[in-house]
Image: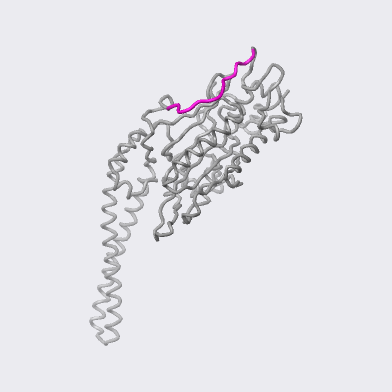
Amino acid sequence: MLTIQFIRDHRDTAIERLKVKNFKQLELIDMIIARDDERRSLQVRTNDLQAELNQVSKEIGILFKTGEKSKAEEARVRTTGIKKELESSGQALQEAEKEISEWLVQIPNIPHPSVPKGGSEADNRVVRQGGQIPVLHEGAMPHWELGLRYKLIDFDLGVKITGGGFPLFRGQGARLQRALISYFLDQNSAAGYEEILPPLLVNEASGFGTGQLPDKEGQMYHVTGDNLYLIPTAEVPVTNMYRDVILQAEELPIKNTAYTPCFRREAGSYGKDVRGLNRVHQFDKVEIVQIQHPSASYDALEEMVNHVEQLVINLGLPYRIVQLCGGDLSFTSALTYDFEVYAAAQKKWLEVSSVSNFESYQANRLKLRFREPSEKRPQLAHTLNGSALALPRIMAAILENFQTPDGILVPEVLHRYIGAGNEKIS
């Protein structure tokens, strides 16, 4: 979340940039500043009362020692009144701090100055495009039909076992999934990311730290008996590894990668645009996460975008990179680039990755800080993450784009993972 100091020092900037994100509750900015003024006065009053109480208590001891019992009793009576005032002031201070915190979590991150205005994905800006859109043979099928024909994906069994949005992969389909996961992890490790295998369930503190709670509570699966949440992305447990941590500047950057299943309720997802693997409730994804020095976070973002781009290029998929407009940015992001690949049988672009810089927004919620060697006071780090990559739509695009009349070719970079004799699904 934003810091109170940032809001106080950059009130006008905060309001103008939040308008780019189409944030409507702009009155919260001035409400926070006014309430913080009250909080500061209450803090001064509380500190003064505590100092007065300490001084009078010290005087009582001296008076008793010197035999001035009547004055000591008078002083004792004074302490009773001070304690009541202190209790009242302390309670008012806690209420002010609580109210400010409740308002702060309602304000999204400030978008980067480069973020364009806009209200929906139609206003996003294509910044780069590559690869060749294939021309398919007559009778080419969408991936859900290919999955059935070649016994790669069984959507009906997924419905039987769990429900809609939980596909079952089998045979060469399961092998291709595993090959993609291994390929992504190996490439990420080669780029300097440490591999992590995190828990798939997180507590409320973790969900709050990365901004899923309370903003996306309705999209998460909640295990009510234990008050835990199934992760919507590996970003949550991996970034929370550094919650309440003070790093040394020389430890930065920290780079992690993790493969996990991901779980998203995606309420209201129906219709032809979400058929097959286009939108599911459980899916596999490989994530990259960086903890960065504020001065280097946007260079790191560019590095991450280039890394994900190379993964897509190596798979031979046509792609485009899109900078999200203000209205399409997530609650916590300052700047996001989406990657989309083209699924030739559906003739549509499918999002397969979001690479984002959250600046200090998540770090403030996480209390994730670092200390420079020459400074005693720690400062907030910057956090970044991206999908490298999400598998369902990558799988959909591979099946559709590499299909032939007599089978589906597997991208060459996956041959070493798929096993000899499996270079073509037939």
Placement of the C terminus among the 4 image quadrants: top right
> Who's the residue at 38% across and 28% down the image?
119
Write down the quadrant of residue 62 in the picture: bottom left
Write down the quadrant of residue 113 in the picture: top left
Write down the quadrant of residue 221 in the picture: top right
Q: Is residue 375 left or right of residue 128?
A: left
Which sits in the foreground, 119 or 407? Answer: 407
Q: Can you name the residue that lies furthest to the top here?
A: 138
Regarding residue 153, the answer to whether it shows in the image is: no
Across and down, in percent, residue 237 comes to 54, 46
Across and down, in percent, residue 411 comes to 65, 28
Q: Is residue 237 magenta?
A: no
Q: Which residues are magenta?
A: 125-137
Regarding residue 425, the answer to whether it shows in the image is: yes
Across and down, in percent, residue 317 comes to 58, 26
> Who's the residue at 41% across and 45% down the image?
361
Q: How many marks?
A: 0
Residue 131 vertical placement versus 73 (above, below): above
Q: Can you name the residue that lies furthest to the right here?
A: 421
